[in-house]
Amino acid sequence: MMTALSKRATAATRRYFWRIAAAMALYLGSLYACEILIEDNGLAGPAACALAALPGLAFAAVPWIFTRLIVEETDEFFRMLYVRQLLVASGLTLTAAAVWGFLETYLPVPHIAAFWWPTLWCFGLGVGAVYNKVTMGVAGECR
């Protein structure tokens, strides 16, 4: 049985969603394991270090997955929309990280844990989609 998404999605879009689902499953599973094994049960040493790195490594797949969507998309217009989203997300995140870094250096502002910057990048992809919708009339909807 085909879902509504699979009826209209391109092969590149379907692969994108499967890859994102796998990366997020690994991310959430490893984050849960960190909470249970390190936070609750006191796992320490090299095993804790390796386990604590897993959520970040799982998230590292996300930019690669988005780049694969751009490479595999056959419609040049949609490729351009995805590149614009990527640029908006990257610009927003790099600017926010740099500004906040200088604020932390020179003012008594609260520290922001580094794992929030990739989260902001994902939010930036949404901002990029809105930018596409406003300027191009289409956000790059899944088709």
Image: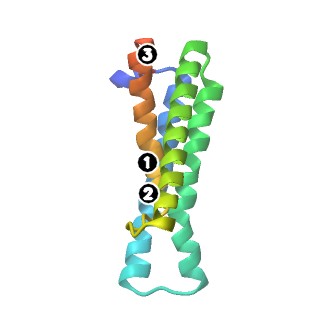
Q: Earlier in the sequence, mark 3 or mark 1?
A: 1
Above or below for 111 versus 6? below
State yes or no: discs 3 and 2 in contact (Cβ < 8 Å): no
To which residue does mark 1 refer?
A: 120
**Furthest residue toward front:** 106
Q: In this orientation, does residue 75 appear?
A: no
Q: Quadrant of the C terminus?
A: top left
What amino acid type is highlighted by mark number 1? Answer: Leu
Mark 3 or mark 2, which is nearer to you?
Answer: 3
Q: In this orientation, does residue 117 appear?
A: yes
To which residue does mark 3 refer?
A: 135
What amino acid type is highlighted by mark number 2? Answer: Trp
Q: Tell me the tag on residue 116.
A: 2
Instruction: Left or right? Give the position of 40 relative to 13.
Output: left
What amino acid type is highlighted by mark number 3? Answer: Thr
Real-space CA distance between mark 2 and mark 1, rounded to the nearest whole angstrom: 6 Å
Instruction: Left or right? Give the position of 139 relative to 68.
Output: left
State yes or no: discs 2 and 1 in contact (Cβ < 8 Å): yes
